[in-house]
Image: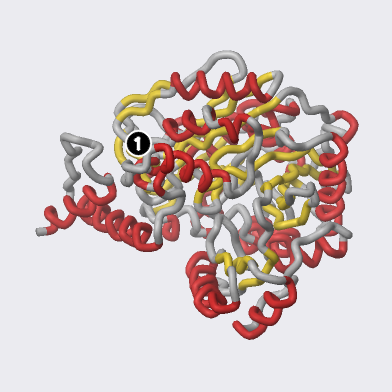
């Protein structure tokens, strides 16, 4: 086992990895940007090393600085967490070239499965079903039109190099293709530095189901069942469950076998997640693979009793899997809510600011994976996740009840959060019946709007912020940063309901500059 591991990440996932290190008797070393100097993961680590200014492009994404920090810390291995460089093959190669261990799969596997087009080809070779469409990049709009006509509208244009909803467009007709094609390519280029896009048949009302796998360097691969990840806003997950409410042992076995065979075709080791779409007829199709630890891994841990992060570190240290397929059992039900510093009354726009009060829930079956503390300023530079709140119960109904109780206990003062939204969802009959698919949030908001048609400013009026709103938010964030750099801070309004914090921050920054 390693003596010291450098954690090349921040926030709640860095805290989670630190705890796994402690359990294994490994010394954790942290890295931080200037915005994270006083962050919780820095406080909990044995040592911490500055990377640079707040923007991730000058800190958490600078490979040379991370490797230098690992060398200075005396670490033998680097854990990338998720996001940032976790699925960057060049980073994995640089870590190995520096004589360090990358806690994750090989660079070759990352490269193969990180591209959605090559991943689809690998899935085809493994005999797994894929969504009808292309396995190669689209050369031009004419090619996109031709393939779309073959598979039938509606279709989905998707970035080949990344995920998270970036570079993704639904195209309902041939007339929409030109605009959607150029927008998808531009967004893919901006997000991933690669404008390659491909096309898939758009499946109506699909469930987004993923299969967790783990493999060692000796050819042993197991699956740990599915996670229901269909509840999403802007193509990003907000609620996850294990097991899926609609699933059964036979379907789980078939999907698990397909996931293992795809991983085997990629010569895969470490943790990984195979994502599938499941249609209303219970047919499943391979979507993509995430070659890293997944955000929602705690629900699998709660349902199976397997510590995935510990297993991932053991695999990187050269040990064999500690579990066999026949050893894995699924007990009860686990549900996770991603608690974000976002304002549900403003289309889930980020709500940066100081956490004036924090009380986290506890009690039977409750787990809170957090990365903040009272008095901490939620930065504007990164994903605004505060924590992942997980509830386990012997049944799905019991898990929902415990999660509702825990959300009621959760107090976060000074900023807006998604907690009120989650409480509303847990009371929704469609959710409680398990009638979930990727369009659930849009329908939820539609039902709420119909119930209260006069509330036009409510988050229930729209599930997705418009492009104009996102641009305005980015401008306001940049202006807010300028104001802070000049030593000023916008004051909190007397009426916090009056306007978006991002708008207020932007306006105050303009006044400060004058």
Residue 23 placement, left or right of 325: left
Would you say 21 lies left or right of 314 here? left
List x then y, in percent, for residue 304.
75, 28
Which is nearer the eye, 7 or 167? 167
Q: How is the image coloured?
A: secondary structure
Q: Is residue 223 visible?
A: yes
Say which residue appears at 53% left-offset and 73% top-offset. Answer: 180
Residue that protrudes farthest toward the left in the picture? 514
Q: Nearer the viewer, residue 294 or 435?
A: 435
The residue carrying pointer 1 sits among few (fewer than 14), some (14 to 19) or many (20 or more) residues within 10 Å by Cα, namely many
> Could you tell me which residue is drawn at 66 percent across and 62 percent down?
202
Give x and y (percent) for residue 283: 80, 51
Which residue position is annotated with label 1? 416
Q: Is residue 232 left or right of residue 23?
A: left
Residue at image location 74% in from the left, 29% down from the top: 306
What count of labels does the image hold? Answer: 1
User: Which residue occupies 35% across, 36% down?
Assistant: 416
Numbered disc 1: secondary structure: loop
Classify residue 90 by image quadrant. Answer: bottom right
Q: Can residue 72 be seen by looking at this rendering?
A: no
Q: In the figure, residue 53 lies in which quadrant?
A: bottom left
């Amino acid at each position: 086992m390693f003596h010291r591991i450098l954690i090349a990440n921040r926030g709640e996932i860095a805290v989670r990895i630190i705890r796994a290190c402690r359990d294994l008797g490994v010394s954790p070393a942290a890295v931080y940007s200037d915005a994270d100097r006083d962050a919780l993961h820095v406080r909990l680590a044995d040592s911490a090393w500055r990377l640079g200014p707040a923007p991730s492009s000058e800190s958490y994404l600078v490979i040379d600085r991370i490797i230098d920090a690992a060398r200075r810390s005396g670490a033998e291995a680097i854990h990338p967490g998720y996001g940032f460089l976790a699925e960057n093959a060049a980073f994995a190669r640089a870590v190995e070239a520096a004589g360090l261990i990358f806690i994750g799969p090989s660079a070759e596997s990352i490269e193969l499965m990180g591209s959605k087009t090559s991943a689809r080809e690998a899935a085809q070779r493994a005999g797994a079903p894929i969504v009808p469409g292309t396995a190669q990049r689209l050369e031009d709009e004419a090619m996109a039109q031709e393939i779309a006509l073959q598979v039938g509208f509606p279709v989905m244009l998707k970035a080949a190099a990344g995920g998270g909803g970036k570079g993704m467009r639904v195209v309902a007709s041939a007339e929409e293709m030109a605009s959607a094609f150029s927008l998808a390519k531009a967004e893919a280029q901006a997000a991933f530095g690669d404008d390659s896009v491909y096309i898939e048949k758009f499946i109506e009302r699909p469930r987004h189901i993923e299969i967790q796998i783990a493999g060692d360097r000796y050819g042993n691969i197991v699956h740990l069942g599915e996670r229901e990840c269909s509840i999403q806003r802007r193509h990003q997950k907000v609620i996850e469950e294990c097991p899926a409410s609609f699933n059964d042992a036979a379907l789980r076995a078939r999907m698990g076998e397909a996931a293992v065979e795809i991983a085997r075709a990629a010569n895969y080791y470490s943790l990984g997640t195979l994502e599938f779409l499941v249609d209303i007829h219970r047919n499943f199709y391979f979507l993509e693979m995430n070659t890293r630890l997944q955000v929602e891994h705690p629900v699998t841990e709660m349902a199976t009793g397997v510590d995935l992060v510990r297993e991932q570190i053991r695999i990187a240290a050269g040990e064999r899997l500690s579990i066999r397929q026949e050893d894995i059992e699924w007990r009860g039900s686990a549900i996770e809510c991603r608690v974000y510093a976002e304002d549900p009354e403003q289309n889930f726009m980020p709500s940066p600011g100081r956490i004036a009060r924090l009380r986290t829930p506890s009690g039977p079956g409750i787990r809170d994976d957090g990365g903040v503390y009272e008095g901490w300023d939620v930065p504007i530079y990164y994903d605004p996740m505060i924590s992942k709140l997980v509830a386990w119960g012997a049944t799905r109904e019991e898990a929902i009840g415990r999660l509702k109780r825990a959300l009621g206990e959760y107090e976060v003062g000074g900023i807006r959060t998604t907690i009120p939204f989650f409480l509303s969802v847990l009371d929704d009959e469609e959710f409680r019946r398990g009638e979930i698919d990727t369009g659930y949030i849009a329908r939820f908001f539609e039902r709420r709007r119909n119930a209260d048609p006069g509330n036009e400013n409510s988050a229930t009026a729209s599930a997705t912020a418009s492009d104009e709103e996102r641009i305005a938010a980015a401008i306001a964030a940049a202006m807010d940063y300028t104001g802070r750099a000049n030593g000023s801070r916008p004051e909190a309004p007397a009426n916090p309901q009056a306007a978006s914090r991002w708008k207020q921050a932007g306006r105050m920054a303009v006044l400060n500059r004058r």
